[in-house]
Image (spheres, coloured by chain):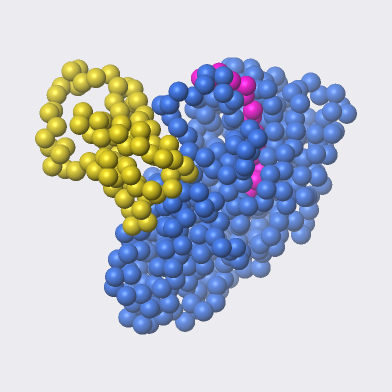
Amino acid sequence: MTGRDARRPVSPVAARPATELRLRVDPVACDGIGLCAHLAPSVVELDRWGYPVVVGHDLGRGEAGEARAAVRACPRRALWIETVQRSTVT
Amino acid sequence: MSPDALGLSARVDLGRDPRTGGRGPALLLRAVQLDRSGPADPWNAVATERLADLMDRVGPRPRGTAELIGVLEREGLTGHGGAHVPTWMKWRAALRAGGPLTVVANGAESEPLSAKDATLLQQRPHLVLDGLALAAEALGARRAVVWLHGADEVTRAAVQAAINERRAARTAEPLLEVVAGPTHYLAGESSAITQALNGGPALPTARRRGTDAAADSPRTLVQNVETLARLALIARGYPPTATMLLTVLTPVGREVLEAPRGTPFTDVLELTGWLRGRPPKAVLLGGFGGMWVHWRDVERLTFDEAELRAVGLTAGAGVVAPLPAGSCGLAETAAMAEYLASMSARQCGPCLFGLPALAEGVRLLAAGTATRRERIQVRADLRAVAGRGACHHPDGATRLITSALTVFEHDLDQHARGRVCPGSGEITLPVPRGTR
């Protein structure tokens, strides 16, 4: 993940959007089917039991595209994208 | 130190209570002793405080208004169910959403060693009910519920009798109800209570923040019963009671007591009979989902949540379980990990598969038969499981095991060389049998 992060353009805070996107998983709904890891390999890894571990950071542009595909494809509707207000991001 | 040195046995004017150093009225009428495990059925039961007695001691309850939130923020009231979240923050969050609100007094104590909530409800149900009524009024709640485990018969009878007494006295307040949930471990978890009161199963759910929840969807605010009792005193204008309710495992049973904030750990251990022979090897703080503290650290600590947090500890819901000298902390941890794995709601993969894997890993470490690969796997699984459940059940298990690997590091090393603790064959903590 570090390599990809390094390639993300660093812009001053003022130029960044007011909201950030995060990929979230509902572990109750998730059955560990694993489509998400195929569709969004940049932001989802599977643990040794086959359940998704999603990246904790805000989604970059390319990552957001992958994440949306994973959200749409999840048969359990266990994934969603959370909009985080800038003021609450720490 | 005698019981009176802590003032724990004295029955005094609770309004100006020397037991709390004058800092707010005490919560308990008296310390009680009970069995090492099982329901909170005290050996020395105290007569339940009547409504008139409560009013004599601390005065009538004021009406709950929106100003109470500011009072709670100023006085710094935090939750006493274990997480110590500032109460005013939860209230503000509850006020932000728009649907009908249910306020819950949570008395479902799932931690097997803890008995302080049941003790408080049995001794002073009206203090808790006052807090619940205050919260319901202040937040404009549609429902006000006392939530208990199904098996808490003694507690339920005490609370129901208190509610009946209030109705007979025509107390002006919202309708208060008692709801007994299932008895399983996670039935006291706040999202499980929320789901159950909205007609679903009493199982934890994940909060989907940032999604379009309907503006009129029902809201539920869950507060621990001790938190509400403290609130009922603060709302009357008393300073926040500077004590901690503790459930201490003793060599023969358990004792629920109220310790003034800042009481040294060693005072509580002496009072409960732990310092007559060889001192304990370590202390389990916060119960099965808590953490081990090495004896040499215990000697320096006091019961002050802020001080404990400053050194990376927390008293959680106030469970204190000393480990007798000669016992094996790894074997005890393995037994607790097995129990916690069996108590998973089996909903979230990382908990369903991770906790049994961890329990097995710790069992091998305790038995001294873990291979190098298995030892590494335990640490990898701790990282893989933490923070990945809908509720904090798996986090409690990983916290316990992580602390064991640190506090019993020397034993761990010895076990790995085949030198297993002589005491590892016998579990001294009262760990219930799991049902996995």
Q: Of B43 and B25, which appears nearest the observer?
A: B43
User: Which quadrant would the C terminus of chain B be assigned to in this image?
Assistant: bottom right
| Residue B220 to residue B297: above or below | above
| Residue B246 to residue B236: above or below | below
Q: Residue at x 70, y 37 (%)?
A: B146
The answer to whether any part of residue B74 appears in the image is no
Reply yes or no: does residue A22 show up in magenta.
no
> Would you identify the image quadrant in which residue B401 lies?
bottom left
Q: Of B217 and A32, which appears nearest the observer?
A: A32
Span shown in magenta: B96-109
Write down the colour of chain B.
blue
Relative to residue B89, is residue B376 drawn left or right? left
User: Which quadrant would the N terminus of chain B be assigned to in this image?
Assistant: bottom right
Q: Residue at x 80, y 34 (%)?
A: B163
| Residue B401 to residue B210: above or below | below
Q: Which residue is situated farthest in the right direction here?
A: B168
Write down the colour of chain A.
yellow
Q: Can you give x and y, in whole percent of width and height, for residue B124 in the image? A: 74, 40
Relative to residue B261, is residue B211 drawn left or right? left
